[in-house]
Structures are given as structure tokens and as C-alpha cells.
Image (spheres, rainbow, N blue to C red):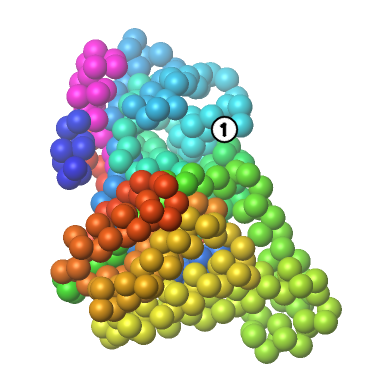
Amino acid sequence: MTLPKLSDATAAQFAKAYGRAPQWIAAAPGRVNVIGEHTDYNDGFVLPMAIERYTVIAAAPSAGGSPRVRLRSTGNKGEPAVVDLTQPMQPFPKGAWANYPAGVLAGFLARGISPGGFDALIHSTVPTGGGLSSSAALEVATATLIEAITGRTLDPVEKALLCQQAEHQYAGVPCGIMDQFISVMGRKDHLLLLDCRSRKPELVAMSDPSVALLITNTNVKHELGSGEYAKRRAQCEAGARILGVSSLRDATSASLQQAKARMEDVIFRRARHVISEIERTPQAARRLEASDWSGAGQLMYASHASLRDDYQVSCAELDAVVEIARALGEPGGVYGCRMTGGGFGGCTVALVKTNAVAALSKKISAEYKRKTGIEATIFVSRPAAGATVLKAKV
Ligand code: GLA
């Protein structure tokens, strides 16, 4: 569904839920990360793009000026939630979907920016638990809505950081900055090479119509809250401490080899993934810029192997899709494929020939079904623009 249609559909849902028309509508996209996985919280590089899947929020002032924020979602776990603005903000019980918008609201209130009471309806086409940043899309859409309501626009980096903070403090996931950043700053027809240390983004054109990014959802739910993510993060910090650097960004393969005897094997392997992935990411950006699709594809396969073997965040279903894609290879239209996002399920991303998309989708889903018994969901997306206000009160 196009964004204007999605916006109209959300407005209609709002009217159904609250019996009046919305005054504001804001949207933020999900993302797919082409390469640079588990590098953002190590001060490294990432190369994501925003996708044409969005979280849209429609809102109107509370009836009678009540200082109360009512949140509803059309999603299947969308029990309504209420925030009373006269009380100090605090998280909902762990796992509640409303923690994402509530955390963002808390961030604005902490900066002295209050939207006052409002009713909101959330509708999303970003699959949840698919590793496509449905949570960041919800956070950034909320922040964009509050900007529209208050007329106070934050600096884009501050906005992304506020949303990341919401995820840390309200959803309890110690995520990096990639997802919120790309959801705020995505550009049509571009990937974003982000240096997570300087937070300087570099646009990488991705507009050649002969190649496409094919996203395959294994439909195995990815669960970042399970503690594995936090464990990886702690292992990276332990590795950096042993290497005497403030983050793994400052380590090299050579310094890691020298320290091998001084660290547990698991820490060594986690660090080896991060250090090699930080090297691969700008290389992949340069290869994509030079239309060296095969070269970029090789780096994607290398990234997957490293995430599977050293970082251990893949799973049998993700590996199955990558193996199917690799077997089809360039003659079948695939340059490269890897898991994308946090891991433990979710999606793969493949760099493919556009004219092979239809045939590939059929072959991958048939073979994946045969191997795992699961129906995959496959789609392509052009790089999309970041968060936007679709309707504002005049
Ligand atoms: C999740 C996090 C990101 C990033 C990726 C792994 O999506 O939210 O910050 O760490 O995992 O690359």
C-alpha cells in the first residue's frame, strides 16, 4: 500500500475508533540493513535503508481538553493504553506494546515539551518481530507526531537518540542507534552509510533499476528482549576491555590475534565478527557505488557466515534461505544474501537482479517450504524516505 493510501486507511480507522476525524497524521518507515550487523553499539559502520513499510499514527486532541493520552493500535496485540499526563511517567509492564510510544512521550516531557492530551490510533505495515525495526518505526512515528502536535522540531540526531533512549528505558532493549537513525533520516533511492561513532551519515546512491533488494521473512519470530542481544553487547564490551580500547572500533584483526591467548574463545569470536564486519561495511558501500554487485554480494555472504559462526545470532531458517539463495547464485539472479537485523529469526536480505525477482521469489518460497515446512513472506523495496508528517493542523 502506498503511503498516502495507508494514511487514508489510518484516518478511517481513527474515525471508527474515536468517532471524529484526526488532526495530525505522522509516519515512519521500517528498515533493512544491507550490511554492518551488530556493529552500531561497537561504534562501527552500518549500511541500512528505509523500506516502503510504515508505522502511521493519526491523532486528535482529547475530548474536553483532558490531560490524557489514549493509544490504540490496529495490531493484534493492540490493547488500548492510557497515559495520564498529570502523573509522573513510568513504563507499562514489560512486554507491553505501548512502552514504545510511552517512552518517546516521556523523552519529550523530560525536555519540557508537552503535546497535551490526545487520542491516537496506530496502524503499521512493518511486520513485528521480523528484524525490520517495527519498534523503531513506532518510536520515530510517535516522535514525529509529537513534533507535529507541538510545532517543536528536534534536531534529527537528538530525535533518533530520544527514540533509542525510549527503547532502552521503556522497552528494556539496549539497542544501538542504527534503527532509529535510518527511520528518521532515510532518503529515497539511497542507502545510508552511518559511522556510529561520529554519527555522520553518508548517502550511498542505490537507484540502478537493474538490481533490487529482496527481503525474505522466515516468519520465525525474532525476540530481542530475550537477553541474547544484551549478552552479545556485554561480550563485546568485555573484548574491548581486554584489548585496552574504548570500543571494538579501535581494535584490528592483528591486535585481536595478539590478545587471543588472553581471552575466552567466545569473546575472541564475538570480537572477530565485529572487527571484520566493521571492515566489510564501508567496502560494501564502495562496491555498490561502483556497481560491483558481485563484489558487494560476496561481502554479504561473508557477513552471514561471520554472524552464524562467530557471533552466533543466526538460526536454521535464516541459514536455509541464505543457502537456497547461494545455490541459485548469479545465474539464478542472486549476487549475495545474508540475515539482517538482530537475528534469531526475522529476515534475510538479498541483492538480486530485478528481472529475476518473480522467479526467485517462487523458487525461494518453494524450497524454503520444502526444507522447513514454513511459508516465507517475500517482498522487494526501493530505499524509502524517512519519517514524515502527512497531516498537520493548520
Ligand atoms: C537491532 C538493534 C540495532 C542493531 C541490530 C544489529 O536491530 O536495534 O541497534 O544493533 O539489532 O545490527
Q: Is residue 101 above or below residue 360?
A: above
Image quadrant where one finds the C terminus: top left
The extreme top residue here reads 64
The residue where tag 1 is placed is: 95
Give me the residue at 30% from left, 44% from top: 54
The extreme right residue here reads 262
Highlighted range, magenta: 10-34
Q: How many marks?
A: 1
Give me the residue at 76% from left, 72% from top: 265
Residue 322 visible, this angle: yes
Give me the residue at 66% from left, 59% from top: 233
Name the spot of residue 232 as percent of width and height, x first.
Answer: 66, 59
Indicate the amino acid at tag 1.
Gly
**Left or right, 139 with reference to 254:** left
**Left or right, 362 with reference to 367:** left
**Left or right, 297 with reference to 228:** left
Give me the residue at 72% from left, 74% from top: 268
**Left or right, 7 with reference to 192:** left
Name the spot of residue 378 as percent of width and height, x first.
Answer: 30, 53
Which corner quadrant of the image does residue 149 belong to?
top left
> Residue 101 versus residue 53: which sits nearer the camera?
53
Name the spot of residue 165 as percent of width and height, x first.
Answer: 56, 46
Q: Is residue 22 magenta?
A: yes
